[in-house]
Each structure stands twice: as structure tokens, then as C-alpha cells.
């Protein structure tokens, strides 16, 4: 029963968290966004004390159930190992006891902490389990999901239905895609061969929770009197933490999956209070464990506590063409001196220190503004660019879903007054200057009125020289930017018709300010 409860909860958490990275409509986030915010490291970085305390209590009471239920990367490893085990009994019983590699575990943890303190978020993000799985889901699983959605949209359109709409599928960042693919291969190979190797040798969150679980109140225990040393428990333990000969379990690596309880054919393994005195096996004053009735009260207690913890956590938290004739040349990314990060990130420094590069904000951005950075120091961490869209003032989705506090929640009113950058005009690219044609797109679409059109001295329509009395055409106009009003939304850059580089682009600010 305990194993069934654990598996059921694990499937629910894994499925919903995966859908958080796949769903581009935001529907799933409205109901289950809290599942991302109860992940261990994001909760710490967001200073979400309530969630951190709950997870610590959960570990100190039940052991490493976080790793086997809540963590998506841990459940993903279990799924891979289970698939291999479906090939036959010998594959299900392919594990064996191995001593803990403490030097490696704590060495990786030390490097992880140093990277966090030093502000090298991209290095820490490589090891953080939730973020690693997020990159796998958003870079590898999401395109497949979107292609499936586009197929449904195509079929629905044939029957005059608009239940689905198509979504552009594009490669947001090559280095991030490669890292996600390599991580996926490593995780799959390790889980296929040795189960929980990643969790118990590399994962820093697993190391921290493993240390805490050594003191948990409830744990898996082996009854020496009943044990026949058949090794079924050890050969079925994907954490390789059961020494059946010595009747000992390494609780720092045990993820409380309950598989060993099901595998034991002699009833020698139980999940119970660790510090209870063992009752005598026989005698006048004692009874054997086989005579003790099943403790249904404990099961009810575990189920009720799990529900309470969950409820508390919830409360805590084709090619494009112009008119079908001319091919529209794709825009190129301008060379920005300062990166642009979303409203809600108070500064670049604060953003990079908190961001775990999980890609959740990238997945939900409806305007394709956010994408992983390719810079070495901020590799995989999101930044904004406006070739495919602009940051609409009415959209606050990235601030709603960020679990690590890198993008703090903002209202639409607050967003419209936060200056994340300012527009810069490039004269040589501007249509009136370059082609002698009227434009004004940037001024028409600026939501804050920061751009006005002013006459271009000496230039008239079609490139006529300065009015000498014979040419009566009006002077062409060029944009003038009021940087005090500009919020850096990128509408001007995105909607500028100049190709391949816009005549106006947004330069980011190191520190955001309200205007």
C-alpha cells in the first residue's frame, strides 16, 4: 500500500510538472504552478521559508520522499529504470550493494555552493535537478508536443474548428539544446544501467536531503530475525543502499521508494519508527512481529500528513511572406552591450544570482521574447530579444511562474512603469533615411508615447533634395526618442520594417527603475 501511494503521487507530480514546461497556453500554470514553487533549490533562492521548512520536516519525518515523489528528475530516472526492468526479472533484480562515494557527493556539493555564492548561476544550473529536467522538457519534449498540437490545429482547421491554434516551433538556443541533449543521454544511460546513480553521486539536492534523512523518524528497517539473506531487497534496490549481509541500510541514499518491502518474500522489511525498541521475537513477556496486527493507523497517519503538507505547500504558493509575394527576411539580433531581463527582475545581478535556468519562463512566454542566453557567464539563463515578438504590457506570465524569485510577481500596472531598457535609433538603417520612404511604425506602436516623429532636415520623399521651391513634397520624418518615457518593451524594434537589422533597438539596463 505504501508503495502504491508513493507511485501514484510520483506520477501525478511528474506528469503535471512536465505539462508546466509543455503548456504554452498558461492553463496548467493557473492551477498547478505551485508544483514548480515547492522544488527545493528554487524555494531557497526565492526565500520561500514556508516551503523550505515543510520540505525539511518532510525529510526529517519520512526520509527522502522528496526525491522519489516531488523531484521530476528523480521520478524520470525511476521511469527509465522501470522500463528496463520490464524486460524481465533479471533486469528488475540487476542492482547490488555498493559503498557510498561520499568524497564525490560532498565534493560536488561544495562546488555547487561555491558557484551559487560566486553568482555563477549557469554552473550551478547544470547540477540542480529540477532545472536540469526543465531544460530537457522545454528543449527536447516541448517541440514534439508543439508539433502534435500543430497537427491537431491543421486537422481542426479542415473542419472549420478553432479548438487548437498553431505554434511556431523554433530552436531558441543551440548551446542550451546541446546541454539538454547531453544531460538527457547521461541521465538515461545511468538510470538504465544503475538506477539512481545520478541522485546519489552527483545531485547536490540529493546530498543535502540525504544527510538530513539519516536522522528521519520513519525509515525502512530490516528485521534480522526474519531475514534469510536472500538478497532480493538489495538486487531490487535502485539506490544500491541495502547491505543485506550486514542487515544495514544507508539512509543517506535511500529514497523511500518502498520497492524493497514489496520484493521481500519473508516480511523482514518494514517502514516504521526508527528509534523504537525492537520487541523480543519470543517469550512470555513478548510477542513476535508476525503476531502483531497490521498498523492501519500508521498508514492513515502517513496519508493524512502527505495531504496536509501538500495543501500547505499550495497555500504557500512555411516561410513568412508579405502579401504572398515577397519573402520577409528574418531579423538579426542586434549587438546589445547590456542584456535585457524581464520586469520583476530588479537588476541583472539579482536576476542571475536567483535564476536556476529551468526555462519555465521561456516555455510560457507567449510572444517568443524570452530565450536562453548563449553567453558563457550566463549560459542557459533567460534573456530578452525582440526579433520574433515584443514584451506586451498586458502580459505578466513570466513573473507569475518563476519559482526561484529571479522574476518577482508584478501587476500590469507596475509593469508599464518599469524601465528595463531604452530604445536606440540607428540612422543608417532607418527607412526614411535609407530609402526615402515614409514610415513611422515605431512611433505608432510605442505604448508609452516615448517616440515622436520629427522632420528630417534636407530630405524629402523619394530622396528629393532640400526644397528649392520647385519640390512641394513634405519633408520626411524620423523618430525622436524620449528615454525617460521608454520602458524597453521592444515594440519599436520588433515592428520596425528595416531588415535584417532594425533601425531602432533596445539597450538593456543593469538596474531597473520605475518611471
Image (cartoon, rainbow, N blue to C red):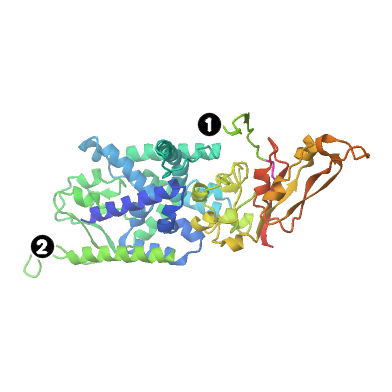
Q: Which residues are magenta?
A: 334-338
Q: Earlier in the sequence, mark 2 or mark 1?
A: 2
* Viewer-proximal residue among 460 and 26: 460
Task: Sort mark 2 into few (<14), some (14-19) or many (20+) by Cα contacts within 10 Å.
Answer: few
Residue furthest left as drawn: 284
Per the image, label 1 sits on a secondary structure element best described as loop
Q: Which residue is mark 1?
A: 318
- The residue under the point 44% across, 55% down is 29
x, y percentage for residue 350? 60, 57
Q: On the picture, is 305 further left or further right than 149?
A: left
Q: Which residue is mark 2?
A: 288
- The residue under the point 21% across, 52% down is 261
Q: On the picture, is 59 further left or further right than 400?
A: left
x, y percentage for residue 451? 74, 52
- The residue under the point 30% across, 66% down is 305
Per the image, label 2 sits on a secondary structure element best described as loop
x, y percentage for residue 217? 29, 64
Above or below — where is 226 with respect to 306?
Answer: above
Report the predominant secondary structure element of the magenta stretch: loop
**Do we see residue 58 in this rendering?**
yes
Quadrant housing the N terminus: bottom left
x, y percentage for residue 248? 26, 53
Residue furthest right as drawn: 468
2 vs 1, front mark: 1
Quadrant housing the C terminus: bottom right
Q: Distance from label 2 to label 1 (Cα)? A: 73 Å
Residue furthest bottom as drawn: 285
Q: On the picture, is 97 further left or further right than 331?
A: left
Task: Sort mark 1 into few (<14), some (14-19) or many (20+) by Cα contacts within 10 Å.
Answer: few
* Viewer-proximal residue among 36 and 365: 365
Amino acid at each position: 500500500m505504501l508503495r502504491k501511494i508513493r507511485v501514484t503521487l510520483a506520477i501525478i507530480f511528474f506528469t503535471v510538472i512536465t505539462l508546466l514546461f509543455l503548456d504554452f497556453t498558461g492553463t496548467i500554470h493557473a492551477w498547478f504552478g505551485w508544483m514548480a514553487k515547492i522544488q527545493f533549490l528554487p524555494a531557497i533562492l526565492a526565500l520561500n521559508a514556508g516551503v523550505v521548512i515543510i520540505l525539511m520536516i518532510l525529510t526529517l519525518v519520512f526520509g527522502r520522499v522528496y526525491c522519489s515523489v516531488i523531484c521530476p528528475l528523480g521520478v524520470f530516472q525511476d521511469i527509465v529504470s522501470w522500463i528496463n526492468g520490464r524486460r524481465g526479472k533479471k533486469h528488475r533484480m540487476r542492482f547490488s550493494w555498493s559503498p557510498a562515494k561520499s568524497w564525490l557527493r560532498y565534493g560536488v556539493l561544495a562546488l555547487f555552493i561555491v558557484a551559487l555564492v560566486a553568482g555563477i548561476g549557469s554552473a550551478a544550473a547544470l547540477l540542480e535537478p529540477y532545472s536540469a529536467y526543465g531544460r530537457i522538457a522545454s528543449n527536447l519534449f516541448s517541440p514534439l508536443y508543439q508539433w502534435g498540437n500543430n497537427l491537431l490545429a491543421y486537422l481542426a482547421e479542415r473542419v472549420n474548428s478553432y479548438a487548437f491554434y498553431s505554434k511556431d516551433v523554433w530552436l531558441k538556443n543551440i548551446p542550451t539544446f546541446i546541454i539538454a541533449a547531453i544531460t538527457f543521454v547521461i541521465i538515461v544511460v545511468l538510470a538504465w544501467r544503475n538506477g539512481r546513480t545520478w541522485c546519489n553521486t552527483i545531485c547536490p539536492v540529493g546530498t543535502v536531503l540525504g544527510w538530513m534523512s539519516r536522522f528521519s523518524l520513519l525509515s525502512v528497517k530490516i528485521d534480522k530475525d526474519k531475514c534469510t539473506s536472500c538478497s532480493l531487497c538489495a538486487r531490487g534496490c535502485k539506490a544500491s543502499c541495502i547491505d543485506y549481509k550486514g542487515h544495514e541500510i544507508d539512509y543517506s541514499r535511500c529514497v523511500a521508494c518502498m520497492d524493497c518491502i514489496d520484493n521481500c518474500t519473508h516480511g523482514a522489511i518494514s517502514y516504521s519508527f526508527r528509534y523504537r525498541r525492537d520487541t523480543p521475537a519470543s517469550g512470555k513477556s513478548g510477542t513476535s512481529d508476525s503476531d502483531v496486527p497490521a498498523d492501519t493507523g500508521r498508514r492513515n497517519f502517513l496519508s493524512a500528513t502527505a495531504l496536509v503538507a501538500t495543501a500547505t505547500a499550495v497555500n504557500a504558493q512555411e516561410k513568412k511572406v508579405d502579401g504572398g509575394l515577397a519573402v520577409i527576411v528574418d531579423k538579426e539580433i542586434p549587438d546589445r552591450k547590456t542584456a535585457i531581463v524581464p520586469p520583476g527582475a530588479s537588476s541583472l545581478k539579482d536576476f542571475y544570482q536567483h535564476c536556476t535556468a529551468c526555462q519555465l519562463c521561456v516555455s510560457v512566454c507567449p510572444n517568443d521574447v524570452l530565450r536562453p542566453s548563449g553567453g558563457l557567464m550566463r549560459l542557459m539563463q533567460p534573456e530578452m530579444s525582440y526579433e520574433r515578438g515584443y514584451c506586451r504590457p498586458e502580459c505578466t506570465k513570466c513573473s507569475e511562474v518563476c519559482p526561484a524569485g529571479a522574476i518577482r510577481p508584478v501587476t500590469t500596472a507596475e509593469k508599464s512603469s518599469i524601465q528595463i531598457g531604452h530604445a536606440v535609433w540607428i540612422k543608417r538603417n532607418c527607412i526614411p533615411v535609407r530609402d526615402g520612404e515614409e514610415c513611422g511604425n515605431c512611433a505608432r506602436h510605442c505604448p508609452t508615447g516615448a517616440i515622436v516623429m520629427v522632420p528630417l532636415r534636407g530630405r524629402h520623399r523619394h530622396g528629393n533634395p532640400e526644397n528649392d521651391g520647385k519640390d512641394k513634397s513634405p519633408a520626411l520624418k524620423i523618430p525622436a526618442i524620449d528615454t525617460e518615457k521608454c520602458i524597453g518593451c521592444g515594440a519599436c524594434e520588433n515592428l520596425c520594417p528595416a531588415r535584417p537589422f532594425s533601425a531602432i533597438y533596445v539597450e538593456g539596463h543593469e538596474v531597473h527603475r520605475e518611471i
